Image: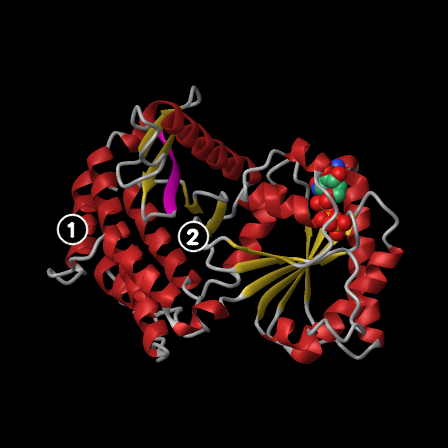
C-alpha cells in the first residue's frame, strides 16, 4: 500500500467525525465522576472471587490490581470476611471485586447470597491445581448451581490456579480432568445451560493477567466497537498488533482480531512497566507531585530484531500499545495522525455509553456498513456493540 493511499485513508478516518467534536480527557473524567455520583453508582457490577481456603484468591486480586509482587503474597493472611475492593478510582475496570473467605456457608442466614449473585457480572472460582481438587470441584458445583438459579446471566469462570508448579503435560491433563468432571456434575444436575470457561493461571507469570483480561472483556459492552476501531487503525497504519491496556492492572480490555500470542502480550506488559517505572523515577516534579501516567505519556522502544514498540495515552486509564516493524515506523506521521483519529473515536464510544447510562436508554445497534470506507465503518462501529447492559 502506498503512502499516498494510506494518507487518503487516514484522511477519511478524520473526516468521519463531526467538526465540533470537542471533548477531551477532562470531559471524559467529568463524565466518569458524574456517573460515579449518580444513584446507580453503587450498583457497579461485581466480580466475585470464590474458592476454597488458600486457593489463591487474595493473591490474584493483590497482584493484578494492587501491584503486589507474587513473592509478597506468601505473607498474606487468610481472609475472614468478604473484602470489597472498588478499583474504579484507579482503573478503567469499573467493577467491585469481592474476595470471599475460603468457605462460604450458603446455609448461614446472615449470608444473603441472592442479593450478592443478583448484582454479579462474573463469578471467578479459583481451584488450586497443586492440591487435591476433589473437594474444590464439589464446592464449585454447589456455588455455580446456586448462583445460576439466582442469576443465569452471570459469566462463570474457573481459574485452574498455581499451575507454575506443574509440567506442561500435567497442566493439560489437569485442565481436561477438571473440565470433564465439572461438566459431568452439571449434566447430572440437568444444568447443561450453565457454561463454565476454564483458564490455566499463575501469579508468577502473565497468565493471570491474560485470564483476567478475558473475564473483564466479556463484561465490556463496547468490546465489538473497540475491536473494530483497533482493526481499522492497525490496517491503515502498518501495525502488526495493538492492545488497548488498562494501565494500572495491565489487563487488555481489547485487541485487534488477529490472534494474541503470549509473547507479544508479555512484551507489551513489560513496556508498560518500563514506562511507568522510568516516569515515576524521572518524570515527577521535585516535590514528588504529578502523575507517572498522563496526557503526555508516549514511548517508543526499538528492539534489536527490527521490532518497534509504541505506547501512547488514550484516556486517563487506557493506553494503546502497538507492535510494528521498523520499516512501518518510517511512516510515523501517518501513525500519529491515525492514532489521533482513533483516540477521538474511543472518546466518542465512551461518551455514547455514559450518556446512555445516564438516561437509561439503550442505544440501538446498527449493522456495520458493508460498503465501508474508514468513515462509514467507524460511524457504524461507534453504534455497534452498545446494546448490552452498560458497564
Ligand atoms: N505457587 C503458587 N502459589 C500461589 C499462587 N497464587 C497464590 N499462591 C500462594 O497461595 C497461598 C494462599 O494464597 P491466598 O491468596 O492467601 O489464598 P486465599 O484463597 O485468598 O485464601 P483465604 O483468604 O484463606 O480464602 C499464598 O501463600 C500464596 O503465595 C500461584 O499462582 N502459584
Residue 163 visible in the snapshot: no
| Crowd rating for badge 1 (residues with CA inside 10 Å; few <14, some 14–19, many 20+) | some
How many numbered dots are placed on residues in this image?
2
What is the magenta range?
A: 318-326
Answer whether residue 266 is magenta in the image: no
Q: Please tell me which residue is depicted at 20% across the width and 43% down the height of the picture.
A: 337
Q: Is residue 67 left or right of residue 333?
A: right
Q: Earlier in the sequence, mark 1 or mark 2?
A: 1
Disc 1 and disc 2 in contact, CB within 8 angstroms: no
- Which residue is disc 2 drawn over? 89
In the rendered image, is residue 184 in sight?
yes
Q: Which residue is mark 1?
A: 11
Colouring convention used in this rendered image of the protein: secondary structure
The residue at 46%/73% (across/down) is 389
Residue 321 colored magenta?
Answer: yes
Q: Quadrant of the N terminus?
A: top left
Q: Secondary structure at mark 2?
A: loop
- In the figure, is residue 215 to the left or right of 357? right
Q: Residue at 69%, 74% (x, y): give it.
A: 112
Say whether residue 353 is left or right of residue 209. left
Mark 2, other Cα within 10 Å: few <14 / some 14–19 / many ≥20: few
Residue farthest along the top direction in this orientation: 304
Residue 347 percent coordinates (x, y): 28, 57
Mark 1 or 2, closer to the camera: 2
Where is 251 relative to 73, above or below? Answer: below
Give the Cα distance between marks 1 and 2: 36 Å
Look at the numbered disc 1 and give the secondary structure of its residue: helix
Amino acid at each position: 500500500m502506498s503512502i499516498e493511499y494510506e494518507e487518503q485513508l487516514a484522511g477519511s478516518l478524520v473526516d468521519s467525525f463531526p467538526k465540533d467534536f470537542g471533548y477531551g480527557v477532562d470531559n471524559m473524567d467529568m463524565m466518569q465522576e458524574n456517573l460515579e455520583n449518580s444513584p446507580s453508582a453503587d450498583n457497579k457490577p461485581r466480580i466475585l472471587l470464590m474458592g476454597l481456603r488458600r486457593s489463591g484468591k487474595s493473591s490474584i486480586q493483590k497482584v493484578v490490581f494492587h501491584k503486589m509482587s507474587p513473592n509478597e503474597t506468601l505473607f498474606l493472611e487468610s481472609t475472614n470476611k468478604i473484602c470489597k475492593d472498588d478499583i474504579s478510582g484507579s482503573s478503567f475496570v469499573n467493577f467491585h471485586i469481592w474476595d470471599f473467605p475460603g468457605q462460604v456457608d450458603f446455609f448461614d442466614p446472615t449470608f444473603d447470597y441472592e442479593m450478592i449473585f443478583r448484582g454479579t457480572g462474573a463469578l471467578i472460582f479459583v481451584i488450586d491445581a497443586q492440591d487435591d481438587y476433589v473437594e474444590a470441584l464439589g464446592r464449585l458445583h454447589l456455588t455455580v448451581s446456586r448462583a445460576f438459579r439466582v442469576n443465569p446471566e452471570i459469566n462463570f469462570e474457573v481459574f485452574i490456579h498455581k499451575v507454575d508448579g506443574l509440567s506442561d503435560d500435567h497442566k493439560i491433563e489437569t485442565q481436561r480432568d477438571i473440565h470433564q468432571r465439572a461438566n459431568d456434575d452439571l449434566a447430572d444436575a440437568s444444568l447443561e445451560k450453565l457454561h463454565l470457561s476454564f483458564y490455566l493461571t499463575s501469579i508468577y507469570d502473565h497468565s493471570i493477567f491474560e485470564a483476567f483480561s478475558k473475564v473483564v472483556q466479556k463484561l465490556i459492552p463496547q468490546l465489538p466497537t473497540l475491536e473494530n476501531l483497533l482493526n481499522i487503525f492497525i490496517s491503515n497504519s502498518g501495525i502488526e498488533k495493538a492492545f488497548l491496556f488498562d494501565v494500572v492492572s495491565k489487563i487488555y480490555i481489547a485487541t485487534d482480531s488477529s490472534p494474541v500470542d503470549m509473547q507479544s502480550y508479555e512484551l507489551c506488559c513489560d513496556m508498560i512497566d518500563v514506562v511507568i517505572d522510568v516516569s515515576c523515577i524521572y518524570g515527577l516534579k521535585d516535590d514528588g507531585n504529578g502523575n507517572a501516567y498522563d496526557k503526555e505519556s508516549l514511548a517508543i522502544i526499538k528492539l534489536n530484531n527490527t521490532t518497534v514498540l509504541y505506547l501512547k495515552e488514550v484516556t486517563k486509564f487506557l493506553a494503546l500499545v502497538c507492535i510494528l516493524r521498523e520499516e512501518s515506523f518510517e511512516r510515523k506521521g501517518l501513525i500519529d495522525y491515525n492514532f489521533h483519529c482513533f483516540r477521538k473515536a474511543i472518546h466518542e464510544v465512551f461518551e455514547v455509553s455514559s450518556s446512555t447510562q445516564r438516561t437509561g436508554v439503550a442505544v440501538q445497534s446498527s449493522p456495520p456498513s458493508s460498503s465501508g470506507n474508514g468513515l462509514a465503518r467507524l460511524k457504524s462501529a461507534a453504534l455497534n456493540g452498545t446494546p448490552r447492559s452498560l458497564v
